[in-house]
Amino acid sequence: MASGDGTAVAWLANTLATFGTALEAGQSVLPGAMTTAPFVAAGQEAEARFGLLGAVSVHFV
């Protein structure tokens, strides 16, 4: 279903509407994500490794 063009987010919005709810401004949507978004606080760091592609890290201030 997910094609990278917003199809998954449109499906989510339409499905939520059938339950009488909606996506709200400012909500995060992770189409295709296999886990929930982690909660972080100032001073924490996170790193993601992508095999041969390398890694990316972030420090939250």
Image (cartoon, grey):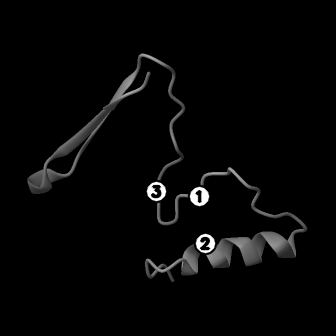
Q: Which sits earlier in the primary sequence, circle 2 or circle 3?
A: 2
Q: CA distance from mark 2 to mark 3?
A: 15 Å
Numbered disc 2: secondary structure = helix
Q: Name which residue type carries label 1.
A: Val
Q: Residue furthest right?
A: 20
- Residue 1 drawn at (x, y percent): 51, 83
Q: Name which residue type carries label 2.
A: Val
Could you tell me which residue is drawn at 47 percent across and 65 percent down? 32
Residue 34, label in figure: 3
Residue occupied by mark 2: 9
Numbered disc 1: secondary structure = loop
Q: Which sits earlier in the primary sequence, circle 1 or circle 2?
A: 2
As drawn, is 31 to the left or to the right of 57?
Answer: right
- Residue 10 drawn at (x, y percent): 65, 77
As drawn, is 49 to the left or to the right of 16?
Answer: left
Q: Name which residue type carries label 3.
A: Met
Q: Which sits earlier in the primary sequence, circle 3 or circle 1?
A: 1
| Vertical placement of residue 41 versus 23, above or below | above
| Discs 1, 2 touching: Cβ within 8 Å | yes
Could you tell me which residue is drawn at 48 percent across and 80 percent down? 5
Residue occupied by mark 1: 29
- Residue 47 drawn at (x, y percent): 28, 35
Could you tell me which residue is drawn at 78 percent across and 69 percent down? 16
Between label 2 and label 3, give the one nearer the viewer: 2
Q: CA distance from mark 1 to mark 2?
A: 7 Å
| Vertical placement of residue 53 versus 55, above or below | below
Q: CA distance from mark 3 to mark 1?
A: 12 Å
